[in-house]
Amino acid sequence: MPPPGSDATLFARCGGAEAPAGFARRGEAATPVRLPTLGQPGMNRMAMTTLDLVGLNCPLPALKTRRALARLLPGDMLRVQCSDPLAAIDIPNLVRETGDRLASAQQSAGRLVFVIEKAPALRA
């Protein structure tokens, strides 16, 4: 049995011994979950990674988003949640600089949510 108070204990109480795919224990990075892509020829699968940056202020949301984008494969998606109002300017500018695609940007209840698609690597 996992130690009391751990995430694994919570999942064990809910019927599973381990955390479901896409969840991580405290202090560990979440594993991207591969989802099927519809309507894009040549791309059968992609990963959606979520980055929770609520409570961080400028420039941290942009810096952490840049670092997360660098780890993705072309076609993968990054969902960024943040509460810093300046992220409404910084994240779209970052996406423009990196050449990636801003799939959506939404604001509700004081939170900004961006979905970014990693662009294919440029050929030299």
Image: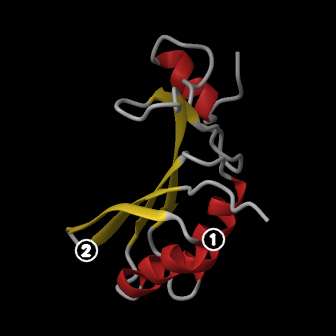
The foreground one among 103 and 53 is 103
Image quarter in which the N terminus is found:
top right
Q: Which residue is mark 2?
A: 110
Residue 45's spot in the image, x, y percent?
A: 53, 29
Asked where in the image residue 68 lies, by quadrant, the reply is bottom right
Q: Residue at x 56, y 55 (%)?
A: 118
The residue at the far right in this view is: 124
Which residue does the numbered mark 1 point to in the structure image? 66
Residue found at the far front of this picture: 124
Choose between 97 and 123: the one closer to the eye. 123
Residue at mark 1 to residue at mark 2: CA–CA distance: 22 Å
What residue is shown at x 79% (from left), y 65% (from top)? 124
Of residues 104 and 19, which is closer to you in this image? Answer: 104
Q: Which amino acid, by three-letter code, is at mark 2?
A: Gly
Which residue type carries mark 1? Arg
Query: Which element carries disc 1, helix, strand or loop?
Result: helix
Q: Earlier in the sequence, mark 1 or mark 2?
A: 1
